[in-house]
Image (cartoon, coloured by chain):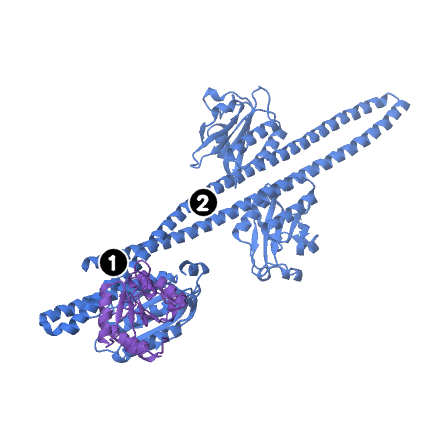
Amino acid sequence: MRDEEKTKEQLIKELIAARQQIDELKALETECKRVEEKLRQQNEYLTALHETALALMNRLELTDLLETIIARAGGLMGTQHGFIHLIEPNKTEMVAKVGIGAWSKFIGKRVKFGEGMVGKVWQTGRSLVVDDYRSWPDRLPDPNFDILRSVVGVPLKSGPEVIGVIGLVYLEEGRKFGDEATELLNRFAQLASIALDNARLYASAQQELTERKRVEVELRKAHEVLEQRVKERTVELSTTNARLEEQMVERKRIEEKLRQQNEYLTALHETALALMNRLEINDLLKAIVVRAGALVDTSHGYIRLVEPTETEMILKVGIGVFTNFIGHKLKLGEGLSGKVWQTGQLIVVEDYHTWPGHLPDPKHHILHAQVGIPLKSDNKVIGVLCLGYMQEGRVFKDEEVELLSRFAELASIALDNARLYTSTQQELTKRIKAEQTLAHYTQELERSNQELQDFASIASHDLQEPLRKIIAFADRLKTLYAGALDSQGQDYLQRMQNAAKRMQHLIEDLLQYARVTSKAQPFRPTSLKSVLQEVMSDLEVRLGQCQGRVEVGELPVIEADALQMRQLFQNLMSNALKFHKPGEAPVVRVGSRPLGGGYYEIYVEDNGIGFEQKYVDRIFKPFQRLQGRQEFEGTGMGLAICQKIVKRHKGEITARSVPGKGSTFIIQLPIQQSKKTGEDHA
Amino acid sequence: MRKNSKSIVILLAEDDDDDYLLTLEALREALITNEVYRVRNGEELIDYLLHQGPFQDSQTSPRPGLILLDLNMPRKDGREALHEIKLNPELKKIPVVVLTTSKADEDIIRSYHFGVNSFIKKPVSFDQLVDVMKLLGKYWLEIVELPG
């Protein structure tokens, strides 16, 4: 009998441990799914950002571009209402240049520095989110704006200077711009700013070109007139003519320069477009160096990236003579790249051989003119792009440096995006793998738990069979042959019967414990008050016997398994009556209070013998008893069943007690059960 | 054409010798003196009812007026046998009382679905078993009218 009991106890412990492990794994799984969902969303955002960037870079006509920007921004944020304000050349006002949705009627609206949300973004140069415009203290008094709910504004910048503001609006009550959405919008505004900057440059270059052409035509006309005069008049005018021709040459030179700038810009655009498409980092780095080289007509260059430790930078890709240096490391401040890293500034070296900062090893002294440009992310140097010429005397022209610096800005963004994309991808792959492993383990555990559960219920069922017979034949023996036994024989028989009855209770409780999950009913709205009424009428006889009293306070209606709630209260109430102080009538108080967060706290308080608080964890474990069987009968399963029921309802149960003063059992239960939990156990 | 209640034959389908003994003793204790015949599994039960195999002689294997059926038996269990009995137009008239240790809901539901006449969970103590037998005897052998 001892051994059997032991095995059972072992079985139950394993069962509980397995159940707990499953619960933990399930929680982990849920967490994993949440992270994966977030990553997936981030990934979608990034893809949207890329597509948007590509679409923007193609537009050079300003109004066209602004309209695209606001439409795309609205698309990203899921709203049809928004606007772009640009700062007027006089720098005292901003004007709404484009507006969509509710904003289309506000095009042309003017706002001063620091005024309203737009003015604030201009003033601070930072994005601003207003959750509810109506209650925002700095709102504009215009009643037209009363329809606004959540508003977000992000700055458009050219370098450090604010040139405009993108604003987006939700008109729906309660909808808000979250941190992630604002971050995405900021990133988008960064890209839009560059596109806008390029479009402006392009427009002004175009304008200048047209202007030059007009002047040239005029000049030519003047020239022709003069020539006529020259013909008519005398040689003295030929000096003037010569001067004019000189001027013409100068004009042509400027025009040529402008044309070149224009070509540069076009090349820049094409390059940017090519870069934005690449998401694989090494691929992208290679493309950056090759494209940059092509822009300034060299085939020698490299990119170094700062290592995650931030103590060194490594040459990741090299072309031309730098192919041999791939993997070469530099510390902060060392050589040209180290200096660029240290200062965060672009450095142009006319001749590396005579440059004081050059690396001592002569193997680095191959190129003459070099330029090192920082690649940045969030204003932090993440790498250096370097290009150089092998021919002595070939130096970097100002416009080439300017072009490279612009190019590096775009390359930085492309690199940033690619890095984000890669890390997101990696994380995603990792998560998916981890999740698969987890799912596998969960399945395994669930299977073994099911086996244990089946085993427990079958075993205890089969155990009942022989036990029933022991009891029945003992009954027969007692009824028919009690007279043939002496008092010792009768005592043995009595003890055997008692032990058999106790084993029967143990098995019944064990089955009940297993049935908390195997025979669970779906969760339904359940009035705990009526559950308690039923329990009290069941206990009526016992209450009368011990002259006990029950004071019932407010009890809520919650989603629960009514049968199990009844079992829970039955066990707690009968404990409260059972462990009463000798010579004192038991008083049990039951009540509840809302906890917030969708939970209720329910207490069952008695004035019984109580227990020492240090045993609080032990009392909820199967077969644990604090009192001897002689004083109080029971199997020690009651509270274990209570705990299992409460856990199945996603709640908690604990107890507070002082020996001799009584105990209070405290149960926290959710008002609503999630759909999934119901299905899990149904 | 009411038969004398004493002449009604009880057929006990029970594989377990101990349970057979206890049931028999309980019947005696309940002062039910009707003849009791025993089969040990579902196959034997059907054979008995259809007078097949060793049960061809209707003198030694008389048709029962009441079947007490255990559900958990080897070979063909009580559930299958019950189903067959209640599908057979001749045998379905014999009242069948399930007497089992199982109180699984699905067993109760299924038994009634097949057409069982009563479902009784075997009580734990012998005294209670005697009480059940008394009531069973009173009801099935004295009160109700059965077809001939």
Q: Residues within 10 Å of mark 2 (few under 14, many from 20)?
A: some
Residue depicted at x 53% and y 21%: A367
Residue depicted at x 42% and y 51%: A29
- Residue A516 pos. (x, y %): 35, 63
Left or right: A546 in relation to A302 = left
Residue A567's disc number? none
Q: Colour of chain A?
A: blue
Residue A265 occupies quadrant: top right
User: Does mark 2 fall on the same chain as mark 1?
Assistant: yes
Q: Earlier in the sequence, mark 1 or mark 2?
A: 1
Q: Which residue is mark 1?
A: A8
Count how many numbered circles sit on residues in the image: 2
Instruction: Output the letter for the chain in purple.
Output: B
> What subunit carries mark 1?
A
Amino acid under disc 2: Ile
In the image shown, does A42 or B7 lie closer to the viewer?
B7
Q: CA distance from mark 1 to mark 2?
A: 39 Å
Amino acid under disc 1: Lys
Q: Quadrant of the N terminus of chain B?
A: bottom left
Q: Which residue is mark 2?
A: A432
